[in-house]
Image (cartoon, rainbow, N blue to C red):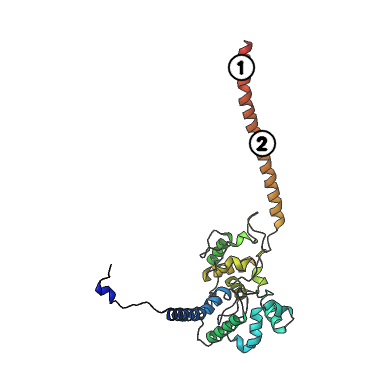
Amino acid sequence: MRRPKNQQNEPKTAIPRPLAAAAAVLAWLFSSAFAQAQDTPDYFRQNCMNCHTIGGGRLTGPDLKDVTKRQTRDWLANFLTNPKAVLDSGDPYAQKIFEESRRVPMPMAPGMTRERAEKLLDLIEAESKLPESQFKGLQISTAPFTAADVQAGRDIFTGRQRLASGGTACIACHSIHDIAALGGGLLGPDLTNVYDRLKGRASLSAWLVAPGTETMQPAFRNHPLKAEEIHSLVAYFEDAARYRPADPTGDRVTFLLLGLFGAAALLFAFDGAWKWRFRGVRRPLVDAAHKRGA
């Protein structure tokens, strides 16, 4: 069958394969360059802001504003790619950072390479030149504490007031002076005197913005505390500093006694249930025997 004349004269619109391949490569290159340009701020936000700000003051780690003016880029890049090796080498500047960070070592950031470290330093230098960096971090209130703040902090600690970001209540891992028996966790330390241990309001607030311990960092990385929650918790910890830490001995004795009473109650309950069941089976047998004897 012959095709219609109008179909025979249609021009071919297929793109030559070499041209299509070149277009695909160019598209990949442009998209890759765009992704890399966007990657560094996101990487800093996800992996560095837990412990650092740029222009917002110290958290667990130092404020990184103008850090390239305090130390050479080569040193900083080496530290970023392997902080443990630099610290273990006895480097005096690394030791200074370690002590100022309350002896919390900087962890190895995921996917860190020399190239990524250089890009992070470029980002920090650029952000340091701005009037206000996007990585300034959470700003904590300096308003005087009130009785309502203290009560709100206690409610947050005990879990009566849920954390806005869905984080775990303090009581799950910590105890404090006024928590009733069996009420506090033992995974973390008693926090009665944490206000004094961390040298007051500013340092404690900075710690709560970005907890740096191996147990707390994963728990709060995606569930950070809000500024008002930190304000209330610090108010509660300041008030708690007037008291002595809770004595876990009393809790252990109470737990033992409750266990003994609970076990005894269960034994009595099982004994009563067995006697009732035994009588329920025995009674029909006795009645049947009496009828046969009659």
Element assignment for label 2: helix
Dividing the picture into quarters, in which one does residue 57 lie? Answer: bottom right
Say which of 164 and 111 sits in front: 111
In x, y percent, where is residue 43? 55, 76
Compared across the picture, whether 142 is left or right of 173 comes to left
In x, y percent, where is residue 161? 53, 60
Compared across the picture, whether 242 is left or right of 8 comes to right
| Location of residue 29 with respect to 172 vertically, above or below | below
Residue reaching furthest top? Answer: 294
Residue type pointed to by label 1: Ala
Residue reaching furthest front? Answer: 1
Q: Quadrant of the C terminus?
A: top right
Number of marks in picture: 2
Say which of 74 and 286 sits in front: 74
Q: Which numbered tag is attached to residue 288?
A: 1
How far, Cα to Cα, is label 1 from label 2? 30 Å
In x, y percent, where is residue 7? 27, 73
Q: Which numbered tag is attached to residue 11?
A: none
The reply to whether residue 16 is in sight is yes
Residue located 63% across and 71% down the image = 212
Q: Quadrant of the N terminus?
A: bottom left
Element assignment for label 1: helix
Say if mark 1 contacts mark 2, CB within 8 Å.
no
Q: Foreground mark, 1 or 2?
A: 1
Residue type pointed to by label 2: Phe
Q: Which numbered tag is attached to residue 268?
A: 2
